């Protein structure tokens, strides 16, 4: 048995999988921010009521969490210091010096995680080729480290110039810190991210140091608590890159688990796209505040080398802290059920990115929200049932929502109430579609062929509209959106991504040296996986970031897993040109190419998951679609530009082989699926809904 | 299609247009070659309606280019008779008077045809890393500054005119980069026109005309209503901008009149054009006046013909702010960037909470190093950098930035692996921020060595465009000026206005100026000063000198 557990900001979700029977059990409770492992104990205890002797039966607990990212955003990390090469202590503060909002002279920038007085310099210098210009003065370094001990520093980041080419001074400093200040946590850039570009590397190393003591404490408590409950299996953590890793590795490199929360849905999407052989899938997870999406091509989600945490201005690129670690290529935009609608200065409608969140939430929640939101519009359009929200546990107030939209939107815009309500729903779809098109196109995909896989509370409500705007042919909705995404915990590989920069022109590269570098990365990958208890053969995949010499960004190139020194320059060059042309439309064979970053992914084969099949209708008492029909309700159909009757189905009574022609609404506890008149939903053997547009 | 748009449909279409131009923008950044582009985002994508009125612009546009382009493209479109455009045509020019004021900004633009009709134009202006010529501020006319590409067709009905590309290739130092970057501009325009056509198709529109009328009218109304809130009046300011040693300072006079919802800016009385590269063409002057107006009144408003409508600008021809051909213009930011702070100063009394003091990143500093390596041949590197931002009425200067232009630094590690140069320091300069109730941001020191070794056997050339060496960024309302910029070669002041030859072993120090302070230094919050002392941003000596506070050690 395996337990997946997602510790979010508000809720902690559990999903328990019995690998032998394929049975799945779920549980949800409030997160306990003081000590998040308390909620884990609550969940395990609750599940134990259904499965006696549960903790002892568990082989694995896999978990993801947003706690790390929240600690950074709320600035609740450790008192951290930074050691840099002399002359460069302000690199962290300069950043890349872009004003992200060029016309806003009062735009805020994030404060560095380490204030200037705790950024100290060390006399040393490594050249760009890794040779040493100036040896580190150990005595002086030791005195500097000691002075940090006196100022009560809990964690130290070390980032020296060009250390990815030669880490000798960083390693020496690490040793000095361990000797001089035992008990103080240390993070060196060579281990966290040996990658060129000093600001990005420093920022990443500092962030790692900032959350390291906290994550270490948290993981220790969690392990202890699980052990007390009788759990003797392995505990894994989801990485932002979609693999899972050991507690030890997560504690060493907490910066790698920052995005672990939203990653599970994408990994589930990867699994579905392989299971159903869907070559292009658009994983679409729409919650209360944001929509997170990701393009999955041939069963694989993209991984990007960098992202930003804690953007100070809405969702503006450049306003957050830069973190450079492999992370699933998620696109996050401020479009969710709680996104607020209002009239802009320009006299047009705006939806988001501000959100009413869960508290006070949409007006219809009746918890004090006074600004109209997407959920209010969805209710008024008839998509949500006022009496069956969250399974009927939370009645919704239609009248308050209607009055507010009339007064705050329709009136000022001079449009009808219906235009306003539909406008809110349609505009948020348009916002998501516009972002999705760019995201898909930039990755060489085609929005007109993607299958949308809908997750999250609001995802299934909006997926049909999004698909229409993209021209996508179909939408799939896994049974129980919450569990659907948590399945990702069980399909994620045990994997670790490694990178090291070594900038060298293809024509002049020493291929034996590169082979050596790859082997070192692979050995490191193996150590990391073995530490996590991996037995059996490890798979390695190699890639390299290459670019035309002088070009600003790199293109990722897969490299065959043969001895690099046996590869031909011309083959590598051809592979680069082919990749470049596929992504950007043309290539320039006359321009020389260089390698920048070498990458290795070490992974174990996935323990395959057998999805539970549902009983087919004939075996199950000969039930038909009509048994699943709860009734009929008027809802808005854009195709007819009118409210028309939609058939309402109970998802829990749908069986494989059944089909629900639109207009239809399929309800389950945590979400509602909307199907317009021009589409039909079919139920497959696993209980997935397949929504296809009529030809 | 005759019906106007309801406000909801309008918003949906407007968003679509913005996402189209952002997609084009992303295409440039992914395919561009020169480091300047990708790091500094020194390019701007936009498109217009068929009359050349700007409709949308990339979200990350550079203010100088964006304002200048809005005027420039419209004028170019007016110059092109309708029958001279065909489907598949691509125009190219770098005429400084037509566009963004110097030869390095090459504009590539194309007509958009839909169902056989001209519906608009898409354009991309990009700052190229090299355009030939002598790279220095002290050229006497534009002919010395490099290749001048008049408005010509690079593609005619989809067919490339190889001769144009060949002409460019043989006149620049980095032909691969320049032609590669031109290709990304073409690709961006292609993305843009394809997506515009798709949108017209999907929404059943014949052309962009009605949409364009609506967008422009609404934007204009928005900024006008913000201007109308300010009391009418005539507000004056004068900027004094240094020139190279031995020449008189340049004066820029600004009379800013707020009349109802209009802003009239008259620069009459400004100095005549100069015999070096600091001359500013009218478009570029307009761009930074517009930057000031927009940042004060409506910073979040998307850029289009409407957001610029309430501003009228008068600058007499033959002055340094509206120079005549063939004036030298390569260093136009050395004067042009000052226009924003001069407008701020004029409006400071009436809008004290909407402006900031002088900034060390005005003007942006550009340094060009080029030379030859024994083993690998010629190399070339352009770096841009800013200085400390000026303080405002509620906060200290925001940090070290280029202002009012924009751009990113080049990582030390990239620079060192791309060139023979070594950076010995990149750090804040304590006490360089102008004192005040709110302190100007600190300036930055950068120390660059051309190391002596076997590889480096020939001298390196260094061209600089900068300022603030003698005249510091001023404070506002009693705030003190920031510290001046400094250029040293081996510790001795060099001449930043001419080409410097560096021998192996030479060390260059470039100190960027600090920002001006805001309000009396005596009013500074004691805690804020203590924090500055703790962070080493102000030294005890500085606290005594600038704030009159004795601090123990």
Image (tube, helix red, strand yellow):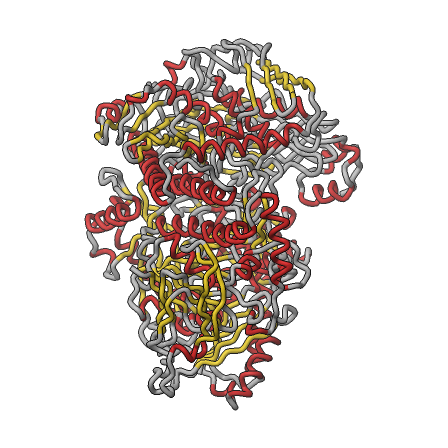
In the picture provided, is A20 more to the left or to the right than B467? left
Residue A516 visible in this rendered orientation of the protein = yes
**Location of residue B57 with respect to A503 vertically, above or below:** above
**Location of residue A673 with respect to B442 vertically, above or below:** below
- Residue B158, x across and y down, in percent: 23, 31
- Residue B10, x across and y down, in percent: 48, 41
* Residue A514: quadrant of the picture: bottom left
Taking depth in this image into account, of B111 and B63 the one nearest to the observer is: B111
Residue at the bottom extreme? A52
- Residue A362, x across and y down, in percent: 61, 59
Query: Which residue is painted at 38% across and 59% down in the image?
Result: A282
Taking depth in this image into account, of B503 and B275 the one nearest to the observer is: B275
Residue B499 visible in this rendered orientation of the protein = no
Query: Which residue is painted at 26% across and 42% down in the image?
Result: A586
**Location of residue B220 with respect to A638 vertically, above or below:** above
Q: How many marks?
A: 0
Taking depth in this image into account, of A15 and A472 the one nearest to the observer is: A472
Query: Which residue is painted at 63% across and 68% down in the image?
Result: A33
- Residue B2, x across and y down, in percent: 41, 35
Screen quadrant of the C terminus of chain B? top right
In the picture provided, is B430 more to the left or to the right than B13? right
């Amino acid at each position: 048995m395996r337990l997946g557990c997602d510790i979010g900001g508000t809720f902690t979700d559990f999903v328990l999988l019995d690998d032998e029977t394929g049975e799945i059990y779920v549980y949800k409770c409030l997160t306990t921010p003081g000590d998040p492992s308390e909620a884990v104990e609550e969940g395990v205890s609750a599940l134990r009521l259904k499965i006696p002797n549960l903790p002892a039966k568990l082989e694995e607990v896999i978990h993801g969490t947003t706690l790390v990212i929240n600690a950074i955003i709320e600035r609740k990390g450790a008192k951290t210091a930074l050691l840099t090469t002399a002359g460069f202590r302000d690199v962290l503060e300069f950043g890349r010096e872009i004003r992200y909002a060029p016309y806003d002279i009062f735009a805020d920038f994030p404060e560095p995680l380490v204030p200037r007085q705790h950024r100290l310099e060390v006399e040393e210098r490594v050249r760009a080729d890794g040779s040493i210009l100036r040896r580190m003065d150990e005595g002086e370094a030791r005195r500097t480290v000691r002075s940090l001990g006196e100022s009560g520093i809990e964690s130290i980041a070390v980032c020296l110039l060009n250390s990815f080419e030669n880490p000798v001074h960083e390693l020496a400093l690490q040793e000095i810190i361990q000797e001089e200040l035992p008990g103080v946590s240390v993070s060196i850039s060579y281990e966290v991210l040996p990658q060129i570009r000093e600001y990005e590397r420093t920022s990443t190393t500092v962030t790692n140091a900032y959350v390291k003591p906290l994550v270490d404490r948290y993981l220790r408590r969690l392990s202890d608590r699980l052990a007390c409950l009788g759990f003797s299996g392995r505990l894994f953590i989801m990485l932002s890159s979609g693999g899972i890793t050991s507690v030890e590795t997560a504690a060493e490199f907490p910066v790698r688990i920052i995005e672990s929360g939203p990653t599970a849905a994408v990994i589930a999407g990867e699994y579905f796209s392989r299971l159903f052989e869907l070559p292009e899938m658009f994983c679409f997870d729409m919650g209360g505040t944001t929509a997170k999406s990701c393009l999955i091509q041939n069963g694989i989600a993209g991984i990007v080398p960098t992202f930003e945490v804690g953007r100070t201005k809405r969702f503006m690129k450049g306003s957050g802290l830069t973190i450079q670690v492999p992370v699933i290529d998620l696109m996050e935009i401020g479009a969710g059920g709680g996104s607020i609608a209002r009239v802009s200065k320009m006299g047009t409608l705006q939806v988001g990115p501000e959100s009413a969140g869960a508290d006070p939430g949409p007006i219809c929640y009746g918890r004090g929200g006074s600004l109209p939101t997407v959920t209010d519009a969805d209710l008024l359009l008839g998509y949500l049932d006022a009496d069956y929200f969250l399974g009927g546990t939370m009645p919704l107030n239609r009248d308050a929502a209607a009055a507010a939209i009339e007064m705050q939107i329709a009136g000022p815009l001079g449009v009808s109430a219906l235009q306003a309500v539909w406008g809110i729903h349609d505009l948020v779809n348009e916002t998501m579609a516009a972002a999705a098109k760019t995201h898909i196109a930039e990755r060489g995909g085609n929005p007109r062929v993607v299958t949308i896989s809908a997750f999250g509370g609001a995802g299934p409500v909006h997926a049909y509209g999004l698909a229409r705007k993209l021209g996508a042919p179909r939408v799939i909705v896994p049974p129980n959106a919450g569990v659907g995404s948590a399945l990702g915990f069980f399909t994620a590989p045990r994997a670790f991504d490694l990178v090291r920069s070594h900038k060298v022109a293809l024509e002049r590269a020493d291929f034996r040296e590169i082979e050596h570098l790859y082997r070192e990365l692979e050995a490191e990958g193996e150590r990391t996986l073995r530490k996590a208890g991996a037995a059996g053969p490890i798979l390695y995949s190699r890639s390299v970031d290459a670019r035309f010499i002088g070009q600003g960004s790199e293109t990722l190139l897969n490299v065959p897993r043969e001895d690099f020194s046996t590869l031909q320059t011309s083959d590598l060059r051809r592979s680069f040109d082919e990749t470049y042309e596929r992504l950007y439309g043309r290539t320039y064979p006359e321009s020389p190419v260089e390698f920048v970053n070498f990458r290795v992914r070490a992974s174990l084969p996935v323990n395959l998951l057998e999805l539970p099949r549902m009983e087919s209708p004939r075996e199950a008492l000969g039930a038909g679609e009509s048994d699943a029909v709860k009734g009929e309700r008027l809802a808005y159909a854009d195709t007819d530009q009118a409210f028309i009757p939609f058939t309402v189905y109970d998802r829990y009574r749908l069986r494989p082989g059944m089909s629900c022609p639109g207009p239809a609404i399929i309800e389950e506890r945590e979400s509602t699926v909307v199907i317009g008149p021009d589409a039909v939903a079919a139920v497959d053997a696993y209980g997935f809904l397949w929504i296809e547009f009529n030809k | 299609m005759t019906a106007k748009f309801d406000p909801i449909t309008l918003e949906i279409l407007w968003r679509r247009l913005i996402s189209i131009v952002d997609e084009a923008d992303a295409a440039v950044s992914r395919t561009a070659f020169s480091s300047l582009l990708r790091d500094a985002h020194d390019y701007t994508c936009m498109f217009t309606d068929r009359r050349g009125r700007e409709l949308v612009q990339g979200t990350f546009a550079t203010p100088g280019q964006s304002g200048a382009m809005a005027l420039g493209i419209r004028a170019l479109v007016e110059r092109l008779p309708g029958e001279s455009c065909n489907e598949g045509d691509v125009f190219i020019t770098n005429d400084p008077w037509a566009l963004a004021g110097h030869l390095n900004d090459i504009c590539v633009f194309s007509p958009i045809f839909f169902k056989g009709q001209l519906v608009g134009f898409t354009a991309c202006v990009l700052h190229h890393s090299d355009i030939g010529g002598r790279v220095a501020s002290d050229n006497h006319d534009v002919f010395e500054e490099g290749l001048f590409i008049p408005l010509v067709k690079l593609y005619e009905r989809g067919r490339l005119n190889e001769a144009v590309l060949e002409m460019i290739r043989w006149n620049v130092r980095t032909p691969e980069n320049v032609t590669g970057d031109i290709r990304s501009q073409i690709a961006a325009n292609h993305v843009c026109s394809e997506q515009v056509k798709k949108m017209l198709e999907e929404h059943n529109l014949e052309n962009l005309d009605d949409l364009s009328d609506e967008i422009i009218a609404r934007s204009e109304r928005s900024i006008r209503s913000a201007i109308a809130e300010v009391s009418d009046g005539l507000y004056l300011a004068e900027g004094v901008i240094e020139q190279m040693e031995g020449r008189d300072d340049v004066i820029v006079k600004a009379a800013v009149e707020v009349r109802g919802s209009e802003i009239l800016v008259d620069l009459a009385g400004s100095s005549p054009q100069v015999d070096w590269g600091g001359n500013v063409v009218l478009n570029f002057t307009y761009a930074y006046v517009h930057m000031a107006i927009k940042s004060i009144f409506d910073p979040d408003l998307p850029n289009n013909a409407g957001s610029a409508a309430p501003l009228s600008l008068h600058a007499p021809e033959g002055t340094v702010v509206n120079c005549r051909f063939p004036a030298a213009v390569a260093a136009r930011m050395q004067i042009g960037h000052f226009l924003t702070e001069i407008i701020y100063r004029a409006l400071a009394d009436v809008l004290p909470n909407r402006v900031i003091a002088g900034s060390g990143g005005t003007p942006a500093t550009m340094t060009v190093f080029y030379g030859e390596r024994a083993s690998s041949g010629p190399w070339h590197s352009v770096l841009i950098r800013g200085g400390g931002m000026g303080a405002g009425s509620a906060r200290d200067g925001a940090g070290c930035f280029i202002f009012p232009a924009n751009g990113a630094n080049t990582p030390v590690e990239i620079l060192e692996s791309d060139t023979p140069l070594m950076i010995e320091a990149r750090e804040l300069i304590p006490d360089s921020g102008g004192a005040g109730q709110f302190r100007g941001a600190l300036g930055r020191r950068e120390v660059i060595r051309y190391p002596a070794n076997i590889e480096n056997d020939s001298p390196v050339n260094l061209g600089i465009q900068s300022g603030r060496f003698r005249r510091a960024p001023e404070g506002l309302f009693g705030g003190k000026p920031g510290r001046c910029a400094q250029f040293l070669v081996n510790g001795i002041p060099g001449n930043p206005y001419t080409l410097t030859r560096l021998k192996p072993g030479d060390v260059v120090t470039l100190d960027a100026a600090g920002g001006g302070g805001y309000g009396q230094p005596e009013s500074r919050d004691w805690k804020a000063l203590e924090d500055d002392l703790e962070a080493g941003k102000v030294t005890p000596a500085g606290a005594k000198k600038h704030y009159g506070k004795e601090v123990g050690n």
